[in-house]
Image (spheres, rainbow, N blue to C red):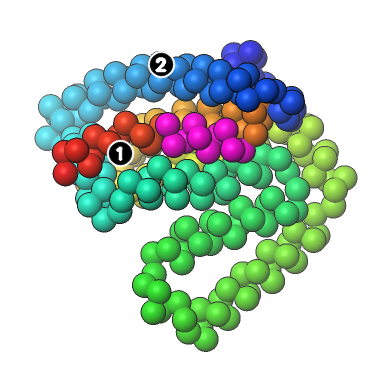
Amino acid sequence: MLYGFFKNPVYVFKQNNSFKQSLKELFSVFCYATLFLFINYLLVSIIDLIIRSTVGFSFMEAINGVQKTASNQNNILFFLIFAPIVEELIFRLPLKVSRLNIFISALMAYFLFYLSHKPISSLITANELIKFVVFISLSILVLSSLKERFLSFVLHKYFGVYFYALITVFGLLHLTNFLSAVPGNLIAFAPLFAFHQVIVGFFLGYLRLKNGLIWCILLHSLFNLLPTISYFINK
């Protein structure tokens, strides 16, 4: 079923599975994802070894350093609860396409990628309020112009393109976590080290369609669990 979905993602949403069935599916998908992530880890480790032996820079060491810094600035609840919920609302909620879902996704993206990087004191200003009102107004204007017939046509004709576009953006946005630590002459190799997140995005999207949003949030938390525990133990 996973292979068929990989070849041709279809716009078919979850059945009325029991809790036991959904839990079984969660751990089944997690095991498959872990296998593919392990294979990817081996491949990028070889690539990283070649780059390090050639130019003396290690992508994996740079990524680990950035992750350790992030773990010092945040807490376990951030990685296991806040991040999975917000990222799934942005990238997996709109897989079930409606104007409301797209609007919530855009709102969460505005919060995560813009507001969350600013100190609270700087947000309580007329300038920021105007920006927010403009953002909301433009979002509503654009979404209201999308006709249901057009959305239905795109989803049933080009859902695979839409699905893979979302997971690719999800993966590439994680480049911002470590790109500043990469020398300019090696930036072209950076997407290879974000492919891990593309794989994660695929399995999250699959489970979102099969079992629903709550279950893909739980899967996201599982993906974050072991690295988070490792970072905080080392800390």
x, y (%) of residue 65? 20, 44
**Residue 223: x %, y % from top left:** 41, 32
Cβ atoms under marks 2 and 1 closer than 8 Å: no
x and y percentages locating residue 228 in the rendered image = 30, 39
169 versus 20 height, above or below: below
Horizontal side of 127 relative to 43 (left or right) equals: right
Q: Nearer the viewer, residue 161 or 107?
A: 107
Give SS at disc 1.
helix
Identified at 56% across, 18% down, the residue is 24
Query: Mark 2: which secondary structure?
Result: helix
State which region is magenta: 213-222
Q: Which mark, by number, is residue 98? A: none
In the orientation shown, which residue stands out farthest toward the right?
Answer: 149
Q: Residue at x 30, y 53 (%)?
A: 74
Q: Tell me which label, 2 or 1, sits earlier in the chain.
A: 2
> Which residue is depicted at the point 16% across and 44% down?
235
At horizontal 46% and vertical 64% (from top left) the residue drawn is: 114
Magenta region includes residue 38: no
How far, Cα to Cα, is label 2 from label 1?
A: 19 Å
Q: Give the labeled residue for mark 2.
A: 35
> Type of residue at label 2?
Leu
Q: Few, some or many C-alpha atoms within 10 Å of disc 2 (few <14, some 14-19, many ≥20)?
A: few
Q: Main secondary structure of the magenta part?
A: helix
Seen from this angle, which residue lies furthest bottom?
126
Image location of residue 84, percent across then percent down: 47, 43
